[in-house]
Image: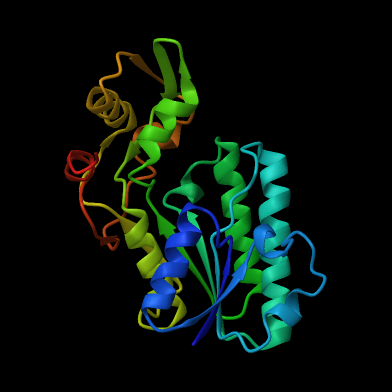
Amino acid sequence: MRIAIAGSTGLVGRNVVHEAAAAGHDVVELSRQNGVDLTSSEGLAERLAGVDAVIDVTQSPTLDEAESTQFFTTVAGNLGDAAKTAGVARTVTLSIIGIDQVPDYGYYVAKLAQEQTAVAHGPDACILRAAQFLEFPGQMLDWNRDGDKVVIPELKTQPVAVTEIASLLVQIADGRVDEALVELAGPEAGELTDFVRSVAAARGTEVEVVGVRASEGMADGACLPGAGARIAGPGFSEWLAGQA
């Protein structure tokens, strides 16, 4: 198969490129580094000529609700329309578990709008809702640290390996998994604040981790996988123990 990957140079995108190539597929990379501006439809259908499936793992450059909604819906609409024009058989979009239950968190509102646009525009549109990445607590520690204090949202999560996300995205794209909506999480659930404390301890970093109730749904477990979710990869504790 020939698979186009939108956002191919990001953390997830690089892994999707690797998984697609390892599965024997030809890869078409769609990113600014490859000369493709997905916020413009110009020339996009031509880039998708001969492509069988499109995987969208693009990331908004901002967490602002209005700006990220504009970005995600524009890109999803452009990709979906171009895919139809080019005769692409399937589109796959990476999303987040629980976004339909968190109306009070702007970025998740934007991701839900992305899903809806992808389904409205893309041929045979499929959505993979994944839990937060295993790397996410470490990112929160780096991004939100202010001196000896880290303030982060209260969030119940069941983080999953990026490699597992990438593998499943490719399996959906090439038809080995034929479901319109799939959830994926790792095997270990917990509080984001506790995961961040574990990362800090593993790094030998002394910080106070403070959780704030930024969203009722996130704090109450909306982002945990449902009963039918796929569970894969190492749990957070196992993964962290294996980090250098």
Q: Is residue 169 left or right of residue 67?
A: left
Query: x%, y% of residue 230?
Result: 28, 63
| Above or below, 158 relative to 179 | above
As drawn, the residue found furthest toward the front would be 244
Q: Is residue 66 above or below residue 170?
A: above
Residue found 32% across the figure and 28% down from its top: 196
Q: Residue at x 26, y 52 (%)?
A: 186
Q: Position of residue 195 (x, y in %)?
A: 28, 31
Residue located farthest toward the top when viewing the structure as drawn: 148
Q: Position of residue 77 (x, y in %)?
A: 71, 66
Closer-to-camera residue (68/109): 68
> Split into 4 quadrants, where in the image is the C terminus?
top left
Residue 179: in sight, yes or no?
A: no
Q: Quadrant of residue 145?
A: top left
Query: Against 68, is 34 above or below?
Result: below
Res 44 quadrant in image: bottom right
Along the line of sight, the residue nearer the viewer: 87 or 135: 135
